[in-house]
Image: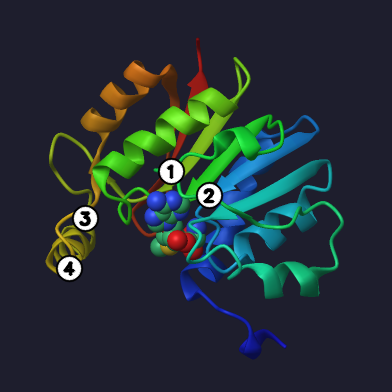
Amino acid sequence: MQKDKPFSQACENNKAPILEKLAELFKQPGTILEIGTGTGQHAVHFASHLPHLVWQPTDHPHNAQLARAWIDDSGLSNINSPIALNVLDGNWADLPEIDGAFSANTAHIMAWEEVEAMFRGVAGALPKGGIFCLYGPFSYGGQHTSDSNARFDQSLRTQAPRMGIRDMGDLKTLGEETGLALEEDFGMPANNRLLVWRRVR
Ligand SMILES: C[S@@+](CC[C@H](N)C(=O)[O-])C[C@H]1O[C@@H](n2cnc3c(N)ncnc32)[C@H](O)[C@@H]1O
């Protein structure tokens, strides 16, 4: 039953608008790597609505089994078992071959060096032309897109200085360094964005 499973209200709120974009972006059959899967609600929702895809959940070893209950209860055959992946340790070579990648609400939780490692790892795992969809709140030129994002950023940095909302300028520079070009930047509900990065080299 749902109440026995890890639950994120944010996932319930954002899964439909994210799915709408993913359905457009991941039209071809293939395997999608998810970084920082969390509860597994996203994985189950996307895999059930996009049956032409195989969903590969991963998360930090501390959280890698968190998604197990949602995945097992779903009975879906197009979700693989979650893999323990700390982007920083980078056991990327152990992952199955992938065609695309997705991550939600991870860049502001990870330290900047982990964000760098995520971009490097995803770029190395994607085929040339493959896309990486990164969802979450981002700032532009150091300016937050809403007062609530500014407060959220402040609360993250108070909890742990290594966390915080990432700036698009820094991410674009990182994308250039790692061979991921920003192709789209979609506005999403609740002051979030869906960034689409394409591996260009
Ligand atoms: C706020 S949660 C987001 C979970 C889920 N994607 C969602 O949208 O609800 C951040 C996730 O990032 C993961 N994470 C943090 N550091 C990580 C790392 N170094 N490697 C892999 N995952 C990491 C955490 O384990 C957690 O599952």
Q: Contact (CB < 8 A) between labels 1 and 2? A: yes
- Label 3 Cα neighbours within 10 Å, binned few <14 / some 14-19 / many ≥20: some
Read off the residue under disc 1: 89
Callout count: 4
Please give the residue where the numbered disc 2 appears in the rendered image: 85
**Which callout, 4 or 2, points to the residue nearer the camera?**
2
Question: How far apart in space, not on screen, are marks 1 and 2 (Cα)?
Answer: 8 Å
User: What amino acid is at disc 2?
Assistant: Leu
Question: In the rendered image of this protein, does residue 174 appear above or below residue 160?
Answer: above
Question: Is 159 left, or right, of 128 in this rendering?
Answer: left
Residue name at image x 50 percent, y 12 percent: 200
- In the picture, which quadrant includes the N terminus? bottom right
How far separated are the C-alphas under marks 3 and 4? 14 Å
Work out whether mark 4 precedes mark 1 in sequence or the reverse, and give the earlier one: 1
Q: Residue at x 56, y 51 (%)?
A: 18
Kindly identify the residue that appears in the image at 18 percent across and 49 percent down.
Answer: 144
What distance separates the C-alpha of mark 4 from that of mark 2? 27 Å
What's under tag 4, amino acid-wise? Answer: Ser
The response on whether ligand 1 sits within 8 Å of label 2 is: yes
Q: Amino acid at mark 3?
A: Ser
Nearer to us: label 1 or label 2: 1
> How far across and how far down the image is residue 87, in percent?
44, 44
Q: CA distance from mark 2 to mark 3?
A: 32 Å
Would you name the residue on which mark 3 appears? 146
Quadrant of res 102: top right
Mark 2 vs mark 3: in front: 2
Q: CA distance from mark 1 to mark 3?
A: 34 Å
- Nearest to the observer: residue 147 or residue 75: 75
